[in-house]
Image (spheres, rainbow, N blue to C red):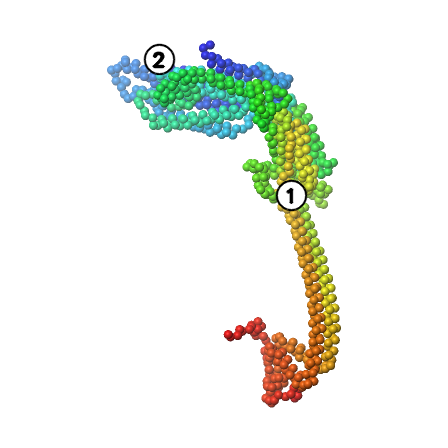
């Protein structure tokens, strides 16, 4: 029985168009990533339905043409009116062949490009999702998707079943896409419901999974195109519809998995595995099993395990159950969405740092470096915090000329780690939308508030411990006033120093103090040495004088004694003794002197003597070693 | 019932969509109201499971009733004594009248933040302008008006926010204070100069102390040497006195003593680098005279 494909194709096309339009509208209205990916699938389904509808029309024209020609051939068999080539005789067939030869691969190529582009663009978004605002109309949008399910499911199912008949294969691609679109609509509705109940991550997971399917469909499309080049063409054999995706078909008809699996098992084991009772039971009861499993999964939400480092809040239809939090251990509750549990790591000690912005790769703050010096920044950013200055408070705000001077305050940088623990989970979770941020702001405010009231030098030196304790108390008080429900465990004052550009000047003061000490110590050393040497010198002077005195006295005694003997000699030889002693002494005295002896008898003669030293003294005094 | 699976699945789907359409939850941390054909109900819905007619008849508008907080911009403002400072303020606020909030801010919380930030900026600049710089930073607790300034800002913001926006501003705090870049550089320069003054002071003190110590040591040395010289001089004088006793012997033959002393002096003088020009009359070179072949007795012509 020959069916006319065109009306069914047209219905599929219109439904695909409606689904794509409505899906796009919903995706734009909701903040759901899954909706965006589903709308892409619906759009691709529309394109496939449109293209297959054109192909159906061409095949219908070809059939009509064939019928007309058959009729004419019967009535005018003997005439030559219809003799000629196939191209002249069957223009519709030739058009259909050209269509399948060129336009179908071209369409597959377009489809491939669209799939790749959509997978790339959407994949980037779902891998790095932004925090999107939750819209109010989500339940209604979920209902719309429910409507889309019913809209696509029945025509899709009909088309897929009809496509199994001979000559109806062109209904398969659009039918598969409609069925897939129906299931994806349900999935999108589930994603919207998840967002509505505050589980945005579910939506992102669905979107990621759909992006993977989109990418797989693109890969399949590419392989189909490549394999099509090498496919053997047998005349008269109907070619498979190139743009029909097996993946889409499989996902649109999950029950066909069983058929495929059964064929594979039968082939592999050599007997009819698919006819065993277990396989038959599995095939018949699969949906029931799935339903029971889903029911058990739903019932499993009626108990909860709280981890040792956690506490949780239990809400029944939005209202708190009890006044206290759930402590670690096992707890029973009504299943979701009647009861909901919100977990918090209340026992964990949490830390943030005020005054600095840590580097992205700096997990341990400044502790990542072993040496912390004032002249080098150890953070991504260090805030210059104004701090009061007693000296500047008393100084005049303007100078003598009335010109503005620098503000009467100093600047300081400090990293202030604050460690805290949640002590009242109810207050922490229910009083503030973003309690972490508020606590950090309160702590920063308290640090600034403290610094503007303390003296710079006192804070830098003796007042640090006192300041840290005061800060802890103030932050705790402010947090309590804000009903944050936290216990401030520790507030540290680390890396407290003048800004990096001024730090060198501060270090120079330390250097100057050391220089002062060094100069004093050097002078003291010199003084000690000088005093010691002075004692020595004084002693030397005294000893020299004493030696002189002894020598002088002894010498005088010796001279006197010698003179007595010389007088005796002189008395004995008054002429010879003086002459002799004179000549002895004279010879000895002038032995080394330069001597000029003038031996002329002419007393009027003028003699010129050059007494200039021509030879260097050291050379003159040089002793020539004697010959050996 | 030909296919119970379809019936069960349909029932579940019907239950889900029915509950979504007719029921809604309001959490303890939320505040909500209903609109019927767009007209807002006056009542604020309490937390729990509530019934509503499906869209488009009734629609739920829900908001987070917890305290939100945000901080504005680190903005420059001028104090009463004409000093420029940067002030960053944070605000904690919550929705108290959801209907008014919804009317005022169809864009939601972000829209409210933008409008509230304008209020806060205005109040901040106005308040900063009425206070001296010393009200913000001062070591004297009596003069410091940090907390009062915050309260003034909060008062200005809270009234308008409650009346116009349906919000309660719970808290307002100055998160950061700072100076503009040019002023910051001036502060740095002043801090450097202060340090430089100390550097010079310490260096001067070092020189002063060192000079004092050296001077004192020099004085001590001089005193010791002077004492030693005096003792030495006394010792030499006594020696001369003792030596003079021995010289009395020389008086027995003065001529011989002087002669001997002359010889000793000549020997000492002619010891180093002496050039002598002698003629034949000088003894013993008188031997060179041809007419004097014999050695004459000394002292004769």
Q: Where residue A284 sits: x, y (%)? A: 43, 15
Residue nearest the observer in this picture, B22 or A457: A457
Residue A422 is left or right of residue A144, and the answer is right
Label 2 crowd bin: few (<14), some (14–19), many (20+), radius 10 Å: few
Q: Which of the 4 image quarters holds residue B295?
A: bottom right
Q: Where residue B187 sits: x, y (%)? A: 66, 42
Q: Is residue A286 above or below residue A618?
A: above
Residue A329 is left or right of residue A37, and the answer is right
Q: Which of the 4 image quarters holds residue A15?
A: top left
Image quarter of the N terminus of chain A? top left
How much space separates mark 2 and mark 1, taking CA atoms?
A: 96 Å
Question: Is there CB contact under 8 Å for labels 2 and 1?
Answer: no
| Residue annotated with mark 1 | B188
> What chain does mark 2 sit on?
A
> What residue sits 73% from the left and 71% below the top?
B239
Marking on residue A417: none
Q: Is residue A495 above or below residue A227?
A: below
The reply to whether residue A131 is in sight is yes
Q: Where residue B196 sits: x, y (%)? A: 66, 48
> What chain does mark 1 sit on?
B
Element assignment for label 2:
loop
Q: Is residue B57 above or below residue B227?
A: above
Q: Which of the 4 image quarters holds residue A14?
A: top left
Marking on residue A1: 2
Residue nearest the observer in this picture, A328 or A353: A328
Residue A553 is left or right of residue B48, and the answer is right
> What residue sits 57% from the left and 41% below the top?
A369
Residue nearest the observer in this picture, A561 or B284: A561
> What residue sits 64% from the left and 88% below the top?
B297
Label 1 crowd bin: few (<14), some (14–19), many (20+), radius 10 Å: many
């Amino acid at each position: 029985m020959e069916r006319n494909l065109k009306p069914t194709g047209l219905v599929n096309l219109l439904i695909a168009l409606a689904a794509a339009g409505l899906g796009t509208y919903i995706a734009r209205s909701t903040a759901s990533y899954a909706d965006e990916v589903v709308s892409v699938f619906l759009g691709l389904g529309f394109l496939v339905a449109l293209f297959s509808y054109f192909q159906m029309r061409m095949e219908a024209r070809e059939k009509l043409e064939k019928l007309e020609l058959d009729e004419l051939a019967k009535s005018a068999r003997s005439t030559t009116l219809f003799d000629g080539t196939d191209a002249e005789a069957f223009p519709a067939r030739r058009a259909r062949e050209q269509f399948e030869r060129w336009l179908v691969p071209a369409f597959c190529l377009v489809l491939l490009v669209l799939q790749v582009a959509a997978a790339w663009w959407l994949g980037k978004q779902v891998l790095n999702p932004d925090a999107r605002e939750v819209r109010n109309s989500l339940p209604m949008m979920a209902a719309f998707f429910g409507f889309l399910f019913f809209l696509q499911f029945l025509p899709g199912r009909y088309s897929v079943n009809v496509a199994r008949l001979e000559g109806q294969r062109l209904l398969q691609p659009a039918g598969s896409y409609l069925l897939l679109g129906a299931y994806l609509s349900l999935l999108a509705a589930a994603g919207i419901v998840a967002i509505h109940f505050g589980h945005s991550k579910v939506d992102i997971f669905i979107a990621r999974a759909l992006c993977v399917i989109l990418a797989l469909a693109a890969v399949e499309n590419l392989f189909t195109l490549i394999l099509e080049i090498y496919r053997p063409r047998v005349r008269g054999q109907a070619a498979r519809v190139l743009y029909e995706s097996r993946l889409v078909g499989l996902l649109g008809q999950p029950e066909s998995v069983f058929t495929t699996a059964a064929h594979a098992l039968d082939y592999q084991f050599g007997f009819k595995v698919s006819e065993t009772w277990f396989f038959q039971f599995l095939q018949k009861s699969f949906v029931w099993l799935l339903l029971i499993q889903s029911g058990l999964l739903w019932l499993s939400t009626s108990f909860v395990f709280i981890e040792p480092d956690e506490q949780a809040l239990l809400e029944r239809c939005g209202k708190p159950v009890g006044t206290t939090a759930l402590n670690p251990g096992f707890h029973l509750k009504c299943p979701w969405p009647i009861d909901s549990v919100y977990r918090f790591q209340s026992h964990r000690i949490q830390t943030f740092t005020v005054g600095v912005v840590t580097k992205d790769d700096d997990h341990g703050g400044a502790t990542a470096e072993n040496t912390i010096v004032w002249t080098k920044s150890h953070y991504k950013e260090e805030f210059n915090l104004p701090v009061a200055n007693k000296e500047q408070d008393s100084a005049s705000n303007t100078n003598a000329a009335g010109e503005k001077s620098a503000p009467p305050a100093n600047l300081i940088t400090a990293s202030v780690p604050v460690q805290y623990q949640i002590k009242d989970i109810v207050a922490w979770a229910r009083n503030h939308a973003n309690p972490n941020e508020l606590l950090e702001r309160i702590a920063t405010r308290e640090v600034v508030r403290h610094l503007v009231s303390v003296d710079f030098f006192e804070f830098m030196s003796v007042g640090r411990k006192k300041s840290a304790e005061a800060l802890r108390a103030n932050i705790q008080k402010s947090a309590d006033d804000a009903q944050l429900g936290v216990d401030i465990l520790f507030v540290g004052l680390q890396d407290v120093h003048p800004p990096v550009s001024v730090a060198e000047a501060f270090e120079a003061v330390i250097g100057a103090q050391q220089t002062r000490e060094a100069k004093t110590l050097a002078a003291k050393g010199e003084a000690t040495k000088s005093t010691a040497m002075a004692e020595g010198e004084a002693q030397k002077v005294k000893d020299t004088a004493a030696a002189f005195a002894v020598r002088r006295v002894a010498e005088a005694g010796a001279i006197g004694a010698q003179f007595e003997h010389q007088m005796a000699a002189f008395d004995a030889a008054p002429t010879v003794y003086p002459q002799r002693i004179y000549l002895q002494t004279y010879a000895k005295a002038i032995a080394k002197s330069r001597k000029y002896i003038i031996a002329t008898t002419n007393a009027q003669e003028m003699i010129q003597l050059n007494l200039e030293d021509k030879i260097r003294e050291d050379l003159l005094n040089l002793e020539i070693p004697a010959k050996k | 019932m030909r296919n119970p699976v379809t019936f069960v699945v349909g029932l579940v789907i019907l239950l889900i969509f029915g509950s979504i359409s007719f029921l809604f939850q309001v959490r303890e941390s939320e505040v909500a109201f209903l609109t019927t054909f767009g007209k807002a109900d006056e009542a604020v819905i309490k937390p729990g499971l509530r019934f509503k007619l499906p869209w488009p008849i009734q629609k739920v508008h829900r908001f987070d009733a917890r305290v939100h907080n945000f901080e504005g911009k680190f903005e420059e403002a001028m104090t009463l004594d004409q000093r420029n400072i940067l002030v960053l303020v944070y605000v904690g606020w919550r929705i108290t009248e959801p209907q008014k909030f919804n009317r005022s801010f169809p864009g939601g919380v972000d829209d409210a933040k933008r409008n509230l930030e304008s209020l806060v900026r205005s109040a901040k600049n106005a308040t900063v302008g009425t206070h001296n710089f010393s009200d913000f930073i001062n070591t004297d607790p009596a003069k410091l008006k940090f907390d009062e300034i915050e309260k003034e800002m909060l008062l200005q913001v809270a009234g308008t926010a409650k009346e116009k926006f349906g919000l309660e501003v719970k808290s307002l705090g100055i998160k950061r204070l700072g100076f503009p870049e040019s002023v910051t550089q001036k502060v740095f320069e002043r801090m450097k100069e202060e340090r430089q003054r100390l550097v010079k002071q310490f260096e001067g003190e070092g020189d002063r102390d060192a000079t004092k110590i050296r001077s004192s040591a020099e004085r001590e040395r001089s005193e010791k040497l002077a004492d030693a010289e005096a003792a030495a001089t006394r010792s030499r004088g006594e020696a001369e006195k003792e030596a003079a006793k021995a010289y009395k012997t020389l008086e027995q033959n003065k001529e011989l003593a002087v002669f001997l002393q002359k010889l000793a002096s000549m020997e000492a003088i002619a010891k180093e680098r002496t050039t002598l020009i002698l003629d034949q009359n000088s003894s013993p070179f008188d031997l060179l005279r041809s007419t004097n072949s014999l050695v004459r007795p000394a002292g004769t012509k």
